[in-house]
Amino acid sequence: MKTCLTLGLLFALACPHFKHPESNSANASVETDGTFDITVDAHEDTPQRFLDDNYDVGSTDPRDTDFISLDKARAGHLDAIFFSIWAYPAKYKGHFGQRTLDLIDSVYSQAERHPDRMMMCFSVEDIQRAHNQGKLAALLGIEGGHSIENDLGMLRDFYRLGARYMTLTWNNTNEWADSSGDTGESDVVHHNGLTAFGRAVVLEMNRLGMMVDISHVSDKTFWDVLAVTKAPVIASHSSSRALVDIPRNLSDDMLRAVARNGGVVNVAFAGSFVDNDFNSEAYAQHLRMLAAAEEYNAKRRAASLPVSPEETQRFEVEWLGKNKIPRVPLKSLIDHIDHVAQVAGIDHVGLGSDSDGVDFLPQDMDSSADLPKIRQALLERNYSPDDVNKIMGGNMLRVFLAVERASRGLQTPVNSR
């Protein structure tokens, strides 16, 4: 499997869809004080739709409900997006690397389809260049360390293809890092945080200039990462545990630790991350959905029809569409941004929508066209324009730049596969 995938990567690097990323960031002349007037979404999930639904980011269909389109991004002054590259573990086991490649290719394909409005970016300098040209900056972030299939060579290959951060885990614990999503599951092999290989992954990401993303990881993994890393870290899509006590959110101690590290916490928009009432109702809804899905699958088995994760997911999406719960007020999201700013400091908070559909987003946040409402709400809470610019994207760019610079001090020859 690994040999085949390596050959596939070499082919991909030579393929027109995979122009080899080049950056002159070592000589970049960029702002460094966090006051970039550039809006960044640190975590956006549309690549699955690019690949599986043939969704076109240039869509002008008024019936389309996706958070992102080129028109919506422009209307919302959204300048840069880190597209999430996520291989669903239950569906792609044994093929994580190939699925990751396919998703990366889907983003490149969108940029090629709309070269006048969108461009692939690999550095802060590239983002500023796209901004100056009036184009949407498209970046890549791998969601889940299982994508590298326990291979530092594959990590390096994904960096070469443009991935500029990796979330160390998704909801699943992998072979080298514990997740917050399965801590109570006795059938999962846990590691008490990072393994020795996990620490090597973090250090290699530091060397490459690839941001280490601690969203999704267990608390012990979080603290292990902070003890190991030689560069600032990010949380691409997490909110405040003090306000909504779920494992995916960060405690105040964690927020302060990220600040000491020089990193940034990009606040997630999802209702269950930012509002306790929604979270309670969403949990009850989730149980109802699971029961409905089990009944649906039982009927399929009884009728000798196939049951698969894909078919189950299709049913669940359809069921959720028919059994909606009220969306959270925008105030709940602003409260989390405000809390992170107060605890970690104004230089350590950003935005990571984690947009999975409008039903999970706050009221009045139907798409990226509505992002100026966040800016306005922060101004109404007496944040200065410069501080709002930091939250809207400047802090994420500052950390990205710091990680690029840290990597230049860590360049040493690497071992071959």
Image: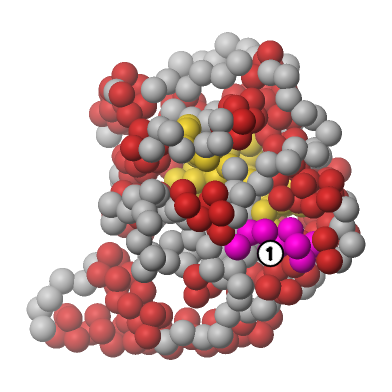
Name which residue lies at 60% across and 34% down: 131
Q: Quadrant of the C terminus?
A: top left
**Element under label 1?**
helix
Image coordinates for residue 371, horizontal then vertical, percent: 63, 59
Residue 14 placement: quadrant: top left
Inspect this view and state whether residue 124 appears.
Answer: yes
The residue indicated by pointer 1 is: 373
Please give left or right for residue 203 compared with residue 250 in the image: left
Q: Which residue lies at the image location 56% right of the left edge and 59% below the top edge?
A: 369
**Left of 48 or right of it: where is 127?**
right
Residue 372 part of the magenta-drawn span = yes
x and y, in percent, of residue 345 in the image: 87, 51
Q: Please give the name of the residue rendered at 47% of the width and 52% of the height, measured from the top-left corner.
A: 71
Choose top left, top right, bottom left or bottom right for residue 281: bottom right
Stretch in magenta: 370-378
Crowd tier of the residue under label 1, counting other residues whose Cα lies within 10 Å: few below 14, some 14–19, many 20 or above:
some
Figure quadrant of the N terminus? top left
What is the magenta segment's predominant secondary structure?
A: helix
